[in-house]
Image: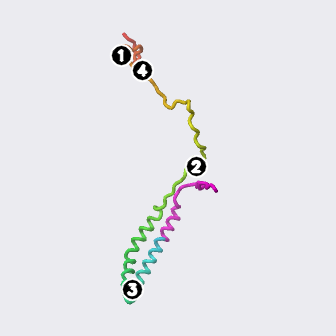
């Protein structure tokens, strides 16, 4: 049985470079607008007119909105999470020794009233 190693940690968890992201969004938008242009041409050119003309018209009307939404949401859908390299390098924790106390208790004695104090808190002499 082969043990799978965790994926290698990447050098950075940054998103795509802005220039690359812009070109990807532009290509997506232009492709969708090309399909819209094709819908407009087919809506007018295909005769006799029938139910498919309404499908082409709907594509010509709806595709600009879809193109903008898809192009702007292209990067928002990607979620990348970096794994902490410290966790991969640490050895497993050893169990705590049984003789060590698990709770530390601090007992404090309450301060007395002003008559019982040996030292004055303000540093002045009694008189």
Extreme residue in the top direction: 127
What residue sits 36% from the left and 83% below the top?
A: 51
Q: Which residue is disc 1 drawn over?
A: 114
Marks 3 and 4: CB-CB under 8 Å?
A: no
* Distance CA(mark 4)–CA(mark 1): 15 Å
In-front residue for pair 85/15: 85
Q: Which residue is disc 3 drawn over?
A: 44
Marks 3 and 2: CB-CB under 8 Å?
A: no
Q: Which mark is residue 109?
A: 4
Q: Indicate the secondary structure of the residue bearing disc 3.
A: helix
* Distance CA(mark 1)–CA(mark 3): 101 Å
User: How many neighbours does mark 3 have within 10 angstroms: few (below 14), some (14-19), or many (20 or more)?
Assistant: few
Task: Give the x, y percent position of residue 23.
Answer: 51, 68
Marks 4 and 1: CB-CB under 8 Å?
A: no
Q: Quadrant of the C terminus?
A: top left
* Distance CA(mark 1)–CA(mark 2): 59 Å
Mark earlier in primary sequence (4, 1): 4
Q: Of discs 3 and 4, which sits in the foreground?
A: 4
Q: Indicate the secondary structure of the residue bearing disc 1.
A: loop
Task: Give the x, y percent position of residue 86.
Answer: 58, 46
* Distance CA(mark 3)–CA(mark 2): 60 Å
Q: Which residue is disc 2 drawn over?
A: 85
Mark earlier in primary sequence (3, 4): 3
What residue sits 42% from the left and 69% below the top?
A: 68
């Amino acid at each position: 049985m082969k043990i799978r190693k965790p994926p290698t940690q990447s050098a950075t968890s940054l998103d795509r470079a802005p220039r690359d992201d812009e070109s990807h969004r532009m290509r997506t938008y232009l492709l969708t607008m090309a399909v819209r242009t094709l819908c407009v041409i087919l809506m007018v050119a295909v005769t006799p007119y029938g139910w498919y003309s309404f499908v082409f018209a709907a594509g010509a009307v709806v595709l600009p909105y879809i193109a903008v939404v898809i192009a702007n949401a292209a990067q928002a859908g990607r979620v990348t999470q970096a794994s902490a390299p410290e966790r991969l390098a640490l050895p497993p924790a050893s169990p705590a020794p049984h003789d060590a106390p698990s709770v530390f208790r601090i007992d404090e004695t309450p301060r007395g009233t002003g008559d019982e104090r040996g030292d004055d808190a303000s540093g002045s002499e009694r008189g």
